[in-house]
Image: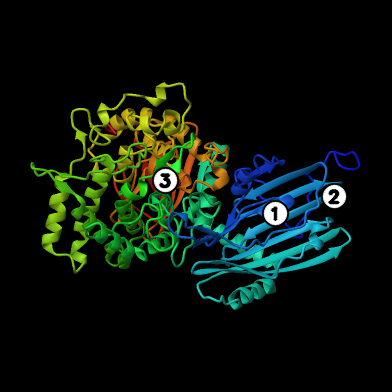
C-alpha cells in the first residue's frame, strides 16, 4: 500500500511519447515481469537485455540501475583464460528514491525492442522506456516520465571511459529534462564508441551524441522501431495455435538478432551481450548454433561472424604448427587475439581441483568453423566468399585433419585423445562426432579444390583417401554409431530411467570420475551428426541412434534439448519434439539451469530456431534449391518461416494439408512429396508427406 493507504496499481497509461501506445498489446510480442524479488533480479535484468549487436545493456530497474552491465562485443580485457569482456561505463544510473511498498511492472516489447518500466511508489507513478538503437549502433536512449525526483536530481557523467589492454570504450552521455504540471520528462541519450587508440579519441563519441541529440528521443525511437520491424520481417517465425510457445520463440529470436553485429567482425560470446558468464568467450555455440539462423535470415550477420574467424586464421595456423601439424587449429575458447583462452582448472563442490581439458582436447571446433562457413555459403550463395575467405577456412581446417589422423596397420585412420560434444568423457579415441565431422570437412575441401589455386590434385586425393579411411564407429547390424571407442563397455546407466528429472547435471550428480566411466551423456554428440550433416551419416540411422542415445542423455548443457527437439521432429516423434522444444524455449525464462544470471544461453536460442526450421519445417538448402519436408504437430494450425535464400526472400507457410512457398525473386523448391517447382511471389503449393509415406528416418 502507498502512503495514502491505496494499493499501488500499474494500470495507468501515462504516455511516454504523446499519442503513442507504449507497448505492444499482443501477448505473443511481450514478456511482462511483475513485481520485484531481489533473488530473481539478476535473472530478470538478463532477460530484459537490450542490444544492437555491438553493445548490450542489462535491464535493471530504476531502483538500482547503477548495477546493470553494459558490454561491447569483442572488447576484452585481461589475458589468457582470464580474458573477459570489458565492463563499459553505465549510461542509465539514476537516483531512485523509492521507499516503502511499491509496485513495478517491466515489459520487454520484442517487436520494437524496447523495455518499459512502470513504478508506483508513495502514490507517485513513473514510467521509463529504454532502447538500444538498431540503426545507430552504440546509441542508447532512455526516457523517464514522472513526478519523482530522480528525473531531475541525477546528473550523469558527461563522458566516461573504460580501458582495456589494447583499446577501450568511450561513452558520451547527454541529458535533458522538461518540467510540466504532470511531472518531469527526462531524456538521456548515450553514445558508445570503441577505440583502439591510446590516448583515446573522444571526438567520435561526442559527435555521435550531438547527432543523436539533434534527432531527439522520439525520432530515434521511430527509426529504431522501423529497423526492428524490418528485422522481424526477415526472420519472424509464426506458430498458430500455441500463443505461449509463440511468445517464447520470439523471445529467442529477439535476443539472437540483438546479439550479433552485421558489419565488420562479430565476436559472439556464449552469452551474447547479456552477461559475463564464460567471460564472453566465443565457442562453437556461435558457429554451429547461432550462425545458421543468421545465415538463413540476415546473411550479413553470419558473414560478420565468419569474418571474426577469418581474422584469427593466422593464430590458428600457428597453433597447428606448434603442435607439429598443418593447417589451422582454432581454439575451443576464443576471445580477442584468437589464442586459446579456455581455463585449465576449476574446483568441484568439495573444493577438489578438477582439470579442464577442453582447450587442449575439444578439437571438433576445427570442423565446426568449416561447417559454419559452408552453412553460410549454402544459404547465401556468396560465391566470392566461397572461393575466397570461405575456401581458406575449409581448406586450412581440412589440412589440419589430414595431419592429425593416425593410420593403423590395416590402413584405417583414427583420431585419438579428444573430447567430443559430450564433455563428460575426456581423452577418448575415435569420437564419432569428431571423426565424421573431420571426414565431412575433408570431403568439402576436396569439392572446393578446383576453385582454389594452391591446392594440388595430390592433396585432394590424399584428403579423399583419409576421409574414406576414417573410422566412424558405425555398426550396420544395429545402425548405431558408437560415441567413441569403448563407449558400449561403460557402466550402463540410463539416466532417463532414473528418478532425476532432466535436464540434470550428470557430472555433478555422479561426480567427475564416475561419469567418465558411465554411459551418461552430457549433450547431443553422435546425434549432432544427424542434425548438422545428415548426408554424411548412414541412411535410416537417425531413429536407432535417437532411441539409443537420447535416454542416456542428461541434457546437462543448454545446447542439448533443442537439437533433440529438431531430431525428434525429423523422426516423426512430434510429442517428444514439442516437449524438448518447450524445455529449450524456457531455459532462460524459467532459469532452468540457475545460470541465467550470468547471461542468456544464446546457443539454446539458436537451437530453438533450428528445431523449427530444420526439424519441423524440414527446410534445407541443397545447391540452388530449397528442400522441404515438413511435419506439423496436431496442436498447431500453421507454422510460418521467413528465410533469405541466395538473395531471395522466401516465406514458408505450413498447414496441415499443404505448404505454400512464396519467393522473390523465384526459387526452386524440392518437396519430399511431389514434384519440384519454382516458387515465386504468387506462391507454389506442395502436398505434405504423411508419416506413412516417409521411410525409416
Ligand atoms: O560450448 C558449450 C559446450 O558445448 C557445453 N558447455 C558450455 C559451452 C559454452 O556454452
Residue designated by label 3 = 345
* 418 sits to left or right of 128: left
Q: Residues within 10 Å of mark 2 (few under 14, many from 20)?
A: some
Q: Give the spatial CA distance, label 3 vs label 2.
A: 52 Å
Return the disc, 1 or 3, that comes first in the chain's sequence: 1
Which of 572 and 266 lies nearest the eye of the viewer? 266
- Towards the viewer: 315 or 230: 315
Name the residue furthest left: 410
Q: Quadrant of ligand 1?
A: top left
Q: Secondary structure at mark 3?
A: strand
* Left or right relative to 230: residue 545: left
User: Which of the two marks, 1 or 3, is nearer to us in this view?
Assistant: 3
In this rendered view, identify the residue nearer to me: 651 or 120.
Answer: 120
328 up-or-down from 637: above or below: below
Tell me which residue sits at (81%, 41%) in the image: 101
Real-space Cα separation, disc 1 to disc 2, in angstroms: 19 Å
The correct choice, above or below, for 326 with respect to 511 in the image is below
Q: Earlier in the sequence, mark 1 or mark 2?
A: 1
Tag 1–tag 2 contact (CB < 8 Å): no
Residue 213 in view of the camera: yes
Q: Quadrant of the N terminus?
A: top right
**Which color scheme does this rendered protein use?**
rainbow
Query: Does the closest atom of ligand 1 sit within 8 Å of the Cβ of label 3?
Result: no
Residue at the farthest right position: 4
Task: Label 2, secondary structure: give it.
Answer: strand
Tag shown at residue 124: 2
Amino acid at each position: 500500500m502507498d502512503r495514502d493507504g491505496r494499493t499501488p496499481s500499474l494500470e495507468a497509461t501515462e504516455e511516454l511519447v504523446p499519442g503513442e501506445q507504449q507497448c505492444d498489446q499482443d501477448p505473443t510480442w511481450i514478456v511482462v515481469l511483475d513485481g520485484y524479488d531481489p533473488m530473481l533480479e539478476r535473472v530478470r535484468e538478463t532477460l530484459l537485455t537490450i542490444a544492437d549487436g555491438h553493445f548490450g545493456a542489462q535491464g535493471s530497474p530504476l531502483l538500482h540501475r547503477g548495477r546493470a552491465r553494459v558490454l561491447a562485443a569483442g572488447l576484452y580485457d585481461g589475458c589468457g583464460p582470464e580474458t573477459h569482456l570489458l565492463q563499459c561505463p553505465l549510461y542509465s544510473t539514476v537516483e531512485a528514491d523509492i521507499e516503502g511498498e511499491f509496485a513495478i511492472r517491466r515489459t520487454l516489447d520484442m517487436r520494437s525492442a524496447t523495455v518499459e518500466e512502470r513504478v508506483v511508489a508513495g502514490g507517485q507513478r513513473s514510467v521509463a522506456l529504454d532502447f538500444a538503437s538498431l540503426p545507430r549502433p552504440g546509441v542508447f536512449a532512455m526516457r523517464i516520465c514522472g513526478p519523482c525526483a530522480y528525473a531531475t536530481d541525477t546528473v550523469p557523467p558527461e563522458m566516461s571511459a573504460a580501458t582495456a589492454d589494447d583499446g577501450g570504450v568511450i561513452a558520451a552521455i547527454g541529458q535533458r529534462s522538461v518540467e510540466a504540471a504532470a511531472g518531469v520528462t527526462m531524456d538521456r541519450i548515450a553514445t558508445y564508441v570503441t577505440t583502439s587508440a591510446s590516448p583515446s579519441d573522444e571526438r567520435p563519441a561526442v559527435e555521435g551524441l550531438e547527432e543523436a541529440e539533434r534527432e531527439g528521443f522520439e525520432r530515434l525511437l521511430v527509426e529504431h522501431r522501423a529497423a526492428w520491424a524490418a528485422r522481424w520481417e526477415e526472420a519472424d517465425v509464426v506458430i498458430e495455435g500455441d500463443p505461449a510457445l509463440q511468445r517464447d520463440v520470439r523471445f529467442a529470436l529477439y535476443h539472437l538478432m540483438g546479439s550479433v553485429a552485421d558489419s565488420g567482425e562479430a565476436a559472439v560470446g556464449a552469452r551474447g551481450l547479456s552477461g559475463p558468464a564464460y567471460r564472453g568467450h566465443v565457442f562453437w555455440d556461435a558457429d554451429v548454433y547461432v550462425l545458421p539462423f543468421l545465415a538463413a535470415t540476415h546473411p550479413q550477420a553470419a558473414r560478420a561472424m565468419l569474418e571474426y574467424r577469418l581474422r584469427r586464421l593466422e593464430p590458428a595456423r600457428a597453433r597447428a604448427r606448434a603442435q607439429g601439424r598443418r593447417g589451422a587449429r582454432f581454439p575451443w575458447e576464443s576471445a580477442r587475439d584468437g589464442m586459446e583462452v579456455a581455463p585449465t582448472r576449476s574446483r568441484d563442490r568439495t573444493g577438489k581441483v578438477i582439470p579442464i581439458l577442453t582447450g587442449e582436447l575439444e578439437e571438433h571446433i576445427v570442423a565446426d568453423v568449416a561447417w559454419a562457413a559452408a552453412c553460410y555459403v549454402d544459404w547465401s550463395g556468396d560465391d566470392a566468399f566461397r572461393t575466397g575467405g570461405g575456401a581458406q577456412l575449409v581448406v586450412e581446417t581440412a589440412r589440419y585433419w589430414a595431419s592429425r589422423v593416425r593410420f593403423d596397420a590395416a590402413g584405417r585412420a583414427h583420431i585419438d585423445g579428444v573430447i567430443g560434444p559430450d564433455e563428460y568423457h575426456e581423452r577418448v579415441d575415435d569420437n564419432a562426432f569428431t571423426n565424421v565431422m573431420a571426414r565431412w570437412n575433408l570431403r568439402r575441401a576436396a569439392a572446393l579444390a578446383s576453385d582454389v589455386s594452391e591446392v594440388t590434385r595430390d592433396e585432394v586425393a590424399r584428403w579423399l583417401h583419409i576421409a574414406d579411411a576414417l573410422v566412424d564407429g558405425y555398426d550396420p547390424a544395429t545402425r548405431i554409431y558408437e560415441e567413441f571407442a569403448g563407449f558400449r563397455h561403460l557402466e550402463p546407466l540410463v539416466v532417463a530411467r532414473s528418478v532425476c528429472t532432466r535436464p540434470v547435471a550428470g557430472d555433478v550428480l555422479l561426480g567427475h570420475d564416475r561419469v567418465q566411466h558411465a554411459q551418461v551423456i552430457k549433450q547431443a554428440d553422435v546425434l549432432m551428426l544427424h542434425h548438422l550433416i545428415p548426408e554424411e551419416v548412414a541412411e535410416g540411422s537417425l531413429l536407432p541412434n535417437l532411441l539409443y542415445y537420447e535416454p542416456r542423455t542428461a541434457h546437462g548443457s543448454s545446447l542439448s534439448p533443442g537439437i533433440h527437439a529438431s531430431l525428434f521432429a525429423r523422426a516423426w516423434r512430434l510429442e517428444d519434439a514439442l516437449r524438448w522444444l518447450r524445455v529449450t524455449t524456457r531455459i532462460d525464462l524459467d532459469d532452468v539451469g540457475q545460470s541465467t544470471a550470468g547471461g542468456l544461453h544464446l546457443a539454446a536460442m539458436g537451437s530453438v530456431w533450428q528445431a523449427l526450421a530444420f526439424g519441423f519445417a524440414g527446410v534445407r538448402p541443397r545447391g540452388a534449391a530449397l528442400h522441404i519436408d515438413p511435419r506439423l504437430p496436431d496442436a498447431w494450425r500453421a507454422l510460418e518461416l521467413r528465410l533469405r535464400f541466395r538473395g531471395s526472400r522466401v516465406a514458408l507457410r505450413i498447414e496441415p494439408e499443404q505448404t505454400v512457398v512464396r519467393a522473390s525473386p523465384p526459387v526452386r523448391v524440392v518437396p519430399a512429396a511431389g514434384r519440384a517447382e519454382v516458387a515465386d511471389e504468387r506462391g507454389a503449393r506442395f502436398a505434405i508427406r504423411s508419416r506413412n509415406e516417409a521411410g525409416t528416418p
